[in-house]
Each structure stands twice: as structure tokens, then as C-alpha cells.
Image (cartoon, coloured by chain):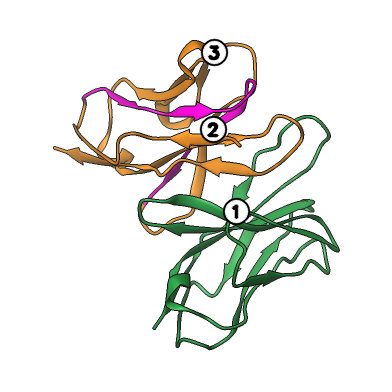
Chain colours: A orange, B green
Amino acid sequence: AQSVTQPDIHITVSEGASLELRCNYSYGATPYLFWYVQSPGQGLQLLLKYFSGDTLVQGIKGFEAEFKRSQSSFNLRKPSVHWSDAAEYFCAVADVFGNEKLTFGTGTRLTIIP
Amino acid sequence: NAGVTQTPKFQVLKTGQSMTLQCAQDMNHEYMSWYRQDPGMGLRLIHYSVGAGITDQGEVPNGYNVSRSTTEDFPLRLLSAAPSQTSVYFCASSYISGSSYNEQFFGPGTRLTVL
């Protein structure tokens, strides 16, 4: 069965600093990978997704993620965070064989300090 | 388009009470699903549906029932609420298109407390 691990429960970053959120997955083949963001009291918004092709994918709000097959990782990055980036971030994986079900990681809460 | 809507936004129940969480989408999506979100556990799939009249269990289905009589609606029923069902519930929907994957759109959530 597929699974997702987000090893960092909580990360604190200064505004303007760079950010990297870690995500490792377990799956028998190349999966579909996603990053979602959840602002306080809100639903989930898709930041970016990887299906195939270029391993560096660009998303909304200045985020990017890199798929590394050898490390089974899909880390999320942003070169300079803004206070509005404070939120919870979820990595997720979907089955490539036409199955729409998503498996989520446990999430990383991001705090931004001035 | 309203997207995915959920009602109510908040609900408090007593143990043993029943209720239905409503989910509707106006995008003509075939796939609909329910997740629960608990601290430190991410989102876990409860039930899902690939079309009207077709439902299946997800990772944590116990204590929940679903039905899909129309494409638009996918209600989640708690027949006898328990404190362990205190959670935030999200509904999501997407198209289904063969071998490719389609983005799931999430509703705003329902925060349920069972006393």
C-alpha cells in the first residue's frame, strides 16, 4: 500500500528566509505526487502536482517541488517566505492506475516569525 | 460555479445522536469522497464514490454510511455518534478520466464535536 511520510511536524522560519518541507513516499512505481496547503480554518488548496516529465515542478504562490526517484522524495521549496505562507502543508500520493484515492502525509505546520 | 459546498460548518452532537453531513458539487464530477482530519494524522479517507449508485469504503469507514443517489450530492451519515468521531470532515470531488489523474477539489470542511 502507498504511504507518505512528512518527518517535520512543525517548522519555524523567519520571513524572507528560504523554506524546504520534506516529503517521502512509498509506492511500487512512479506515483502521482501533490502538495496541498491549508490555511487556518480553511479547506485544502492544491499548490502543485507531479505526474511525469520534468522532475522540478512549479506551483502557485512561488512554490516549487522536486521529485527525486532515488530518494523517494518530493520536497517542497520556496526561496523567500512571506507571513501569509503560515499554514499547514500536506504531501499526498495517488495511485497511477486510474485510482482517484489520495493518501496524505500527517502534515507540517509552518510558522513564520517577523 | 459554487464548487464543493458542505453543510453545516459546525456541529455539536451528544453521544448516540445521528446526523448527516451534506456535500454537494456543481462541476458534474463523477468522483466524490469524504475525509476526516485529526491532529497529527493528516487526512484519512472514509468513503468514496465513482458515480451515482456506486460507493466504496476507504481507510476508516466504521461508524459512517454513505449513499450517492445523484451526481451532485454525497451525504455522510453518522448513525450513532461517538466521541471518537470528533473531527473535521472534508468532502472532495474530481473528474474521472481513464488512466490519468484529475485534481480533487475540496470543500471548506465541517467541524464536528461529539460530547
**Secondary structure type for disc 2:** strand
Magenta span: A17-39
Q: Which residue appears at 59% of the width and 27% of the height?
A: A27
Type of amino acid under label 2: Phe
Q: Is residue A85 above or below residue A64?
A: below
The answer to which image quadrant residue A93 occupies is: top right
Both labels 1 and 2 in a single chain: no
Report the residue marked by disc 3: A55
Q: Which residue appears at 49% of the width and 20% of the height?
A: A72
Q: Residues within 10 Å of mark 2 (few under 14, many from 20)?
A: many
Please identify the quadrant where the C terminus of chain A is shown: top left
Pair 1/2: label in front: 1
Type of amino acid under label 3: Thr
* Chain name for mark 2: A
Residue A25 forms part of the magenta stretch: yes
Determine contact: label 2, label 3, CB under 8 Å.
Answer: no
Position of residue B8 measured from the top left corner of the image (x, y, whole percent): 54, 75
The answer to whether residue A29 is left or right of residue A106 is: right
Please identify the quadrant where the N terminus of chain A is shown: top right
Q: Which residue appears at 83% of the width and 69% of the height?
A: B69
Q: Residues within 10 Å of mark 3 (few under 14, many from 20)?
A: some
